[in-house]
Image (cartoon, rainbow, N blue to C red):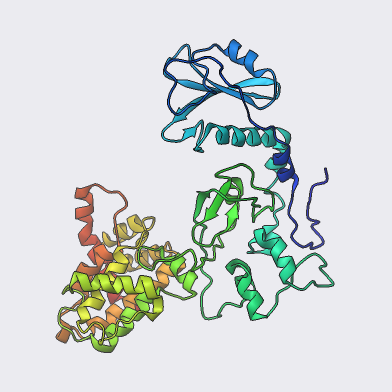
Amino acid sequence: MALNVFDHDEYRPPVWKSYLYQLQQEAPHPRRITCTSEVENRPKYYGREFHGMISREEADQLLSQAEGSYLIRESQRQPGTYTLALRFGNQTRNFRLYHDGKHFVGEKRFESIHDLVTDGLITLYIETKAAEYIAKMTINPIYERVGYTTLNQEPTLKKLLPHSPEMPDGPVPIKDGRNTERLTSLVRRATLRESDMVPKYEKVHNFKVHTFRGPHWCEYCANFMWGLIAQGVKCADCGLNVHKQCSKVVPNDCQPDLRHVKKVYSCDLTTLVKAHNTKRPMVVDMCIQELEARGLQSEGLYRISGFSELIEDVKLAFDRDGEKADISSNAYEDINIITGALKLYFRELPIPLITYDAYPRFIETAKITDAEKRLESLHEALKLLPPAHIETLRYLMAHLKRVTDYEKENLMSSENLGIVFGPTLMRAPELDAMTALNDIRYQRLVVETLITNEDVLF
């Protein structure tokens, strides 16, 4: 069978590689060997495929009639444990069988034994027939040719889009609004120019094991994703669908999609800014703009807490409305509600603004007594932060520096702000309680130094 492989010197339009799909169609079908006699102590989650405590030899004889034949037996050596005996490749294969509400022999869990056997036969057949092919799937990926695209929509796209004379089988971008709306967001994004003002932050994909309904192809290598369940992984942020093995080589170019990124709070910072195509989280920009418009002279700014119920309202407004959230004085007259909402945003980041990876370096920097050497070390530590984090930190520190300009009115010095923001921006990565407590003073010192030397460090 001829396999689809791209010529390195000539571009070819994306084409599905159907070899693995055809192999799945050829895989043996499950054939249940029914037990004709009554079996005592049959587990309630097994049916007539359960044959009780029979030997391997007896099972082998019962299964010898056809490929795909299967039965369940109880172990003679370990009563109370069960084995799935399956005929494949003219030999009987035995798998330890488990049940925790669903049936499984490995990672995948199934509602029925029939589904488990079906998936197992598909996997065994494909891995037997195409082991070398599977090993080479990631070598010449379609992903590098066409960039970000949801290839599963290919048949639909061919009907929607005009054909180019140079690429008789491939779609070309179109500008008609009605058709564009019908494309997946990933394809649509590929036709849009990003604003030159917005940095192109690098982001890793957030892959999760996923069960695809109906035939699906990998968007990295364009090969079929075989099996009944958990056929591959899906990026929870952008929706990219790939084989588990392909996910290890996909570039760190995740483009989060607002269809998948539905929260503002508790969302990874880089994911949020890429989803909204902004330099910084809109929460940070909007809250700081509101604070500087009407709150810089407010006594105890950031130190005095607002009502927690109203802060929660602001959080829900951002999660629901994004940049359209109303945080004006008409909605929240008390400026401490806005400071509370901003601090809550930083506290709920899954990865703190000063990341877990960079945390030890920042703490060690704060322990340096020589002021000049501390600044040099802090400058190096900042380089450990992801671009979106350092840009947000720069913007926040510039704002806090302006807060200290009104210290006579608001009574908030850089030291006071360090006490507030140290534990807010930095969290110890799995340290014991005593060490974490000792780190608080160094957290304060880090933020205080960042504020005082904001113009030099950023």
Instruction: From this view, report whether residue 346 is shown above or below residue 140.
Output: below
State the image quarter where residue 320 is shown: bottom left
Residue at the (30%, 57%) spot, across then down: 364
Q: What percent of the width, then of the height, locates residue 43?
A: 43, 23
In-front residue for pair 343/96: 96
Residue 70 point in image, percent of width and height: 60, 24
The quadrant of the image that shows the C terminus is bottom left
Residue 57, percent across and down?
A: 60, 11
Q: Residue at x 68, y 52 (%)?
A: 221
Residue drawn 46% across the image and 11% down it: 77
Task: Give the mark count.
Answer: 0
Which of the 4 quarters of the picture holds residue 437? bottom left
Horizontal side of 338 relative to 7 (left or right) equals: left
Q: Is residue 323 visible?
A: yes
- From the viewer's perspective, is residue 137 above or below residue 104? below
Q: Is residue 82 above or below residue 7?
A: above
**x 78%, y 55%: residue:** 6
Residue 393 visible at all: no
Between 387 and 32, the one nearer to me in the picture: 32
In the image: residue 370, left or right of residue 200: left
Q: Which is nearer the eye, 415 or 46?
A: 46
Task: Please identify the quadrant where the N terminus is shown.
Answer: top right
Residue 11: quarter of image: bottom right
213 to 348, vertically: above or below: above
Measured from the top left, where is residue 420 in percent x and y?
21, 69
